[in-house]
C-alpha cells in the first residue's frame, strides 16, 4: 500500500471517529431534552384524536427511554383543514402532511412535534367486482429528526352496507358519531375506536421517524 493511500485512509478513519463522537453528544442532548417532557401541537380539537396522539407518544418514549415521559398535547385549529373522510390514502396523507407542516411553519419552535391527522375510506380493487372499502387513519409528524407518516389498522366496510353507495356516501349512511368513538367503533362494536386507531397511526409514524435513533427496550411488556 502506498504512503499516500495509507495517509488517506488514516484521515478518513479520524474524520469518521470525530463524526461519531459529535453524533453521540448530539444524541445525548437530544434524549436528555425529551426526558424532561414533550410538547406536541396537534391539528384539530377532537378529544379522541388528542388522547390517541398522547397515548402513542407516551408509549413510544417510555419504551425507548425506559422511564415515564411527560407529554403535553395542545390542540390547534387550522383554516382550510379537511374535515370528514378523505377519498383515499393518498388524499389522507396529503391532508395530514399539509396540516402538520402548516402548524410547524406557523408556530416554529413552540412545540417539539407537530401532528396532522386524517381518516379516509380507502377503495381497493381486489377482484373484478366492485372495489372494497376500508376505513383507515393516517398520522403525519413533523419533528427534529424530520417527517414521517403512519397508518392505523384497516377495517373493511361490509359489502352489504356499501352496496350501491359511493365512497362519499358510505360514512353518512352508517350510524357513527364522534361521541360514540366514530366509524371504527360502530363497525367493531366498541372493541376499537377512533382513539385507538389514531394511537396506532401515530405510534407507527414515530417508529419510522426515530428508526435508528431510538430503539425500544427488548422484551419490554407493551
Image: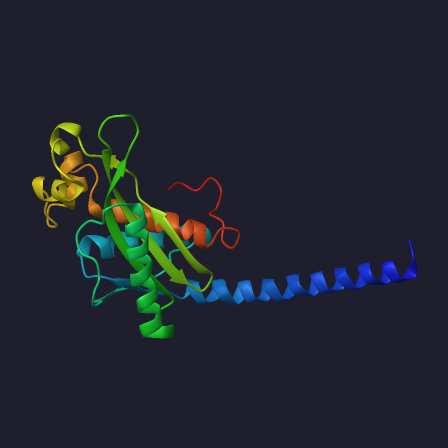
Q: Is residue 138 left or right of residue 27?
A: left
- Residue 28 seen in this snapshot: yes
Horizontal and vertical percent position of residue 65 = 46, 55
Horizontal and vertical percent position of residue 77 = 21, 67
Up/down of 42 relative to 212, above or below: below
Pick the residue in front: 35 or 199.
Answer: 199
Q: How is the image coloured?
A: rainbow
Residue beneath the point at 21% across and 46% down: 194
- In this view, the residue farthest toward the front is 128
Q: Quadrant of residue 11?
A: bottom right
Pick the residue in front: 96 or 91.
Answer: 91
Up/down of 144 relative to 168, above or below: below
Residue beneath the point at 38% across and 56% down: 68
Q: Quadrant of residue 171?
A: top left
How many marks the image carries: the answer is: 0
Tell me the quarter of the image containing the C terminus.
top left
Q: Is residue 68 left or right of residue 27?
A: left
Amino acid at each position: 500500500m502506498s504512503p499516500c493511500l495509507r495517509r488517506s485512509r488514516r484521515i478518513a478513519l479520524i474524520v469518521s471517529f470525530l463524526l461519531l463522537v459529535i453524533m453521540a453528544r448530539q444524541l445525548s442532548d437530544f434524549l436528555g431534552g425529551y426526558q424532561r417532557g414533550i410538547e406536541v401541537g396537534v391539528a384539530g380539537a377532537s378529544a379522541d384524536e388528542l388522547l390517541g396522539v398522547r397515548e402513542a407518544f407516551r408509549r413510544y418514549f417510555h419504551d425507548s427511554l425506559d422511564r415515564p415521559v411527560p407529554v403535553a398535547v395542545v390542540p390547534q385549529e387550522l383554516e382550510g383543514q379537511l374535515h370528514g373522510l378523505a377519498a383515499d390514502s393518498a388524499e389522507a396523507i396529503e391532508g395530514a402532511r399539509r396540516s402538520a407542516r402548516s402548524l410547524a411553519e406557523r408556530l416554529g419552535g413552540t412545540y417539539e412535534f407537530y401532528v396532522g391527522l386524517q381518516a379516509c375510506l380507502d377503495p381497493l380493487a381486489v377482484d373484478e367486482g366492485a372495489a372494497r372499502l376500508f376505513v383507515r387513519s393516517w398520522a403525519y409528524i413533523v419533528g427534529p429528526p424530520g417527517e414521517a407518516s403512519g397508518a392505523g389498522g384497516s377495517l373493511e366496510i361490509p359489502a352489504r352496507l356499501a352496496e350501491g353507495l359511493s365512497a362519499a356516501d358510505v360514512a353518512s349512511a352508517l350510524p357513527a358519531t364522534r361521541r360514540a368513538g366514530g366509524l371504527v367503533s360502530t363497525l367493531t362494536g366498541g372493541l376499537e375506536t377512533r382513539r385507538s386507531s389514531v394511537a396506532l397511526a401515530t405510534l407507527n409514524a414515530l417508529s419510522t421517524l426515530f428508526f435508528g435513533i431510538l430503539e425500544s427496550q427488548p422484551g419490554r411488556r407493551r
